[in-house]
Amino acid sequence: MANKTVSALTTGAAEPALAPHPRMSAEERRRQLLEIAIDLFSQHGFSGTTTREIALAAGVTEAIIFRHFATKQDLYSAILEHGYPAASEEWLAGLQVLMDRDDDEGLFRLIIAHILEIHRTEPRFERLMLHASLEGHELAVMHRNQIMASIGVRFRQYIERRQRAGVLRECDPRTIIFAVVGMAEAFGMHKYMYQVSEPLQSDEEISRDFASILVHGARRSGITRSGITKC
């Protein structure tokens, strides 16, 4: 943590009096601290939040935080495990089925739908990760590594295989991945973070149309340059 987060126990400063709080089990306390940390980080960023503030919001001392999370890496790892909905075995199995079928459009659609589901169900976590990215915080790197371990490497290998088969455009495979993820992230932020009152389409419809545009392009087949059509 930043210097200003150093525990009063190490500086010798007296802790302020804390209001009485109900006794919790170790697991309940850990979960409470994680929820409060995610709330504060998502609202104020990492540079704007101290462990002291987390402790005060929980009604405990900083020593309690350090009892549950010995290092800052322990806290950040726990935030990722607690706050980010891990890819389920069922979802990963569904991806593999689509990859085995060489179903590019179905695969893109399922990935886009998953990203939008995270935006819809965990907007707080998305705000937290935006803060982490803007601040160059190590949590952003940890999150990217987590994604690569779960699906990123497999998705890239699939793109490369389909490129070798002559089906997908020849380019850096990451370009196609950025196109898939970027569409979903932009729409998710537009709808759930910025809370635009009139979203373009439902998540299901936008997942379908984004996947179709990625695979087939935005132009209808047989349409000339002057014959622009709507989706």
Image: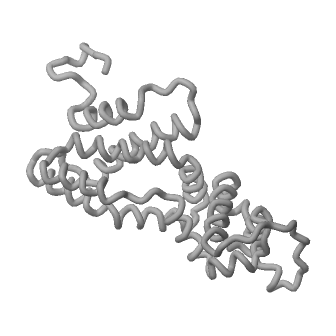
* Residue at 51% over, 62% down: 140
Give coordinates of residue 206: x percent, y percent.
37, 32
Count of all numbered marks drawn on residues in the image? 0
Residue in the foreground of this view, choosing between 165 and 55: 55
Give coordinates of residue 44: x percent, y percent.
70, 54
Residue in the foreground of this view, choosing between 171 and 146: 146
Residue in the foreground of this view, choosing between 216 and 102: 102
* Residue at 63% over, 59% down: 38
Relative to 105, is 177 on the left or the right? right
Quarter of the image for the N terminus: give it.
bottom right
Find the residue positioned furthest to the left: 165
Corner quadrant of residue 65: bottom right
Find the residue positioned furthest to the top: 227
Give coordinates of residue 16: x percent, y percent.
90, 72
* Residue at 37% over, 57% down: 87
Relative to 142, is 102 on the left or the right? left
Give coordinates of residue 43: x percent, y percent.
68, 52
Corner quadrant of residue 221: top left
- Residue 104 vertical position relative to residue 160 in the rendered view, above or below: above
- Residue 86 vertical position relative to residue 55 in the rendered view, above or below: above
What is the image's colouring? one colour
* Residue at 31% over, 21% down: 231
Residue in the foreground of this view, choosing between 22 and 135: 22
Relative to 213, is 53 on the left or the right? right
- Residue 176 vertical position relative to residue 41 in the rendered view, above or below: above
